[in-house]
Amino acid sequence: MTNTHPWFGTHHLPPAADADTIRTSLRTAIRDTGWPYQPLLPAAPIVIPRGSYAELFRVTAALLDLIRRTALETGPTTADRLAAYRMPESEHNLFMADQFLEERYADCVTRPDIVIGDQGPQFLEFNVSGALGGPVETHCRLEVWRTLYQDSHGRAPFAHRSPFATRAEMFRHLANELGVAPRIAIVGSARDQGVTSTRYFDIEVEYFTNHGLTAQFFEPEDLHKAWDCPPHLRYPLGLRNFTIPDWQELSIDTTPVQAALDHGCLLVGTQTSTFLSSKLTMGLLSEGRPWMTTAERALVDQYLPWTRVLSERKTTWEDRKIDLIPWAVDRKDTLVLKEGLGMSGKQVLIGKETPQALWESAITKAAPTATSIIQKYVEPRSCKLAMVADNAEEPYETEVAPVLGPLLFGGRPAGMFSRFFGDNRTGVVSVMGTNSSDNCVVTI
């Protein structure tokens, strides 16, 4: 039975080439980056109508503004916000001394996770971080599709945004705004990628270098070279391509990063982005803020599934008051439980896939901390896509229910990432966490 949704349109591309060529091209492009092996690969990009493509970027920008305002209003200072969000001690680090810069550049890099439900796009969460997945992967996928589909004039039968071109534009704008040289430090670690190669970072450095920027990748142990040098050789801007929890798990010291920040290197997104990325912020926004206009309230109601910060209290569901904890326990099959901080689909329980006893235990355990949310479960709708499996001689067409991730850099559309199961599985969709497949999304 088909589960396709008209939002995806009716246009889809045939396989880009034969099965072997597609597999080899996709895997060669993403090689040595730490990207997991995928036995099921797309045989074409996901194509959506121009109106649908534009809608996601337009709404992402509008919701991101509301997310930012909601997060910052939880407290007038960083210390107040850390307390309001009950942030772990590990997240109390890597703030700039200039709080205005912290707040100003917190939302430079974002990617929401969106599914298409019965009523259209639904924003399940906002990833606001320089370390979010999608830019490198989308760039690599796009390069393959452009090569395989281009005609004799070098034209492809689709339109798209380039993640690296948009990110380069963002850094040029930041350099002009701050009055500094456009010298960009990409800060991360190959250890974080699980490989010895630095290719994940080198791809972007090479692009920037070929397009008029000065860029260099720095492991944390070498980051002092970005500021402890003559002024004209310093790197005043950079991309913070790591998370504190990931580096903490790998015992990577963040002290060199703090030193770079203290010596004037602006790394985006700033640590304040953690408040924006917290799922608690979506809970606060969904419940409504007193400063919201009627139009903003309507936008949130249309695109955000009902979400609440989980605690012992009363709240609203549709037009009635509810006691949140017992109500959430009883409504297991319609809800999802998520911790405020988490990545790769971790710390997520889908109610209808969880035994009642485990669900009730998880709800009652999470409630006293007020660091988790419950969210209305959205049944994702699907689109048609050509796929290719390991050892298959020919691509085949199937239906996939993608999680869509429009990339926004400095407020500018920067391409669209997607993740999905190619074998009709259900559950949390994550390339790193649940071995889903990935692709880029283009428009007609």
Image (cartoon, rainbow, N blue to C red):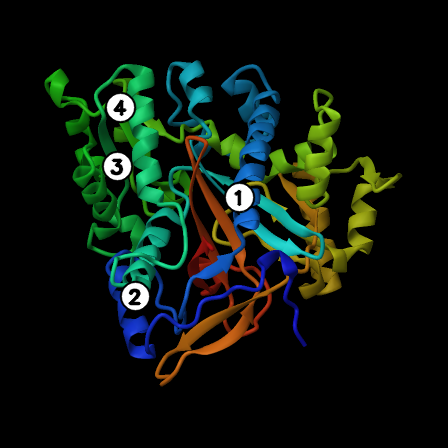
Q: Residue at x 32, y 78 (%)?
A: 18
SS category of the residue bearing label 1: helix
Structural distance between the alpha carbons of marks 4 and 2: 45 Å
Q: Secondary structure at mark 2?
A: helix
> Label 4 is placed on what type of residue?
Ala
Which mark identifies residue 148?
Answer: 2
Q: Could you tell me if the residues under marks 4 and 1 are in contact, i.e. CB atoms within 8 Å?
A: no
> In this picture, is 392 found above or below 438?
below
Q: Looking at the image, do the residues carrying marks 3 and 4 touch, with CB atoms under 8 Å apart?
A: no
Q: Quadrant of residue 257?
A: top left
Name the mark on residue 186: 3
- Say what amino acid the circle numbered 2 marks: Leu
Q: Amino acid at mark 1?
A: Ala
Question: Is 93 drawn above or below residue 135 in the view shown?
Answer: above
Estimate how packed mark 4 is, as few (under 14), some (14 to 19) or many (20 or more) residues with alpha carbons within 10 Å. some
Upstream in the sequence, badge 3 or badge 4? 3
Disc 3, SS: strand
Cα distance between the residues tagged 3 and 4: 15 Å
Q: Position of residue 103 (x, y in %)?
A: 47, 21
* Residue hosting label 4: 259
Mark 3 vs mark 4: give the one in front: 3
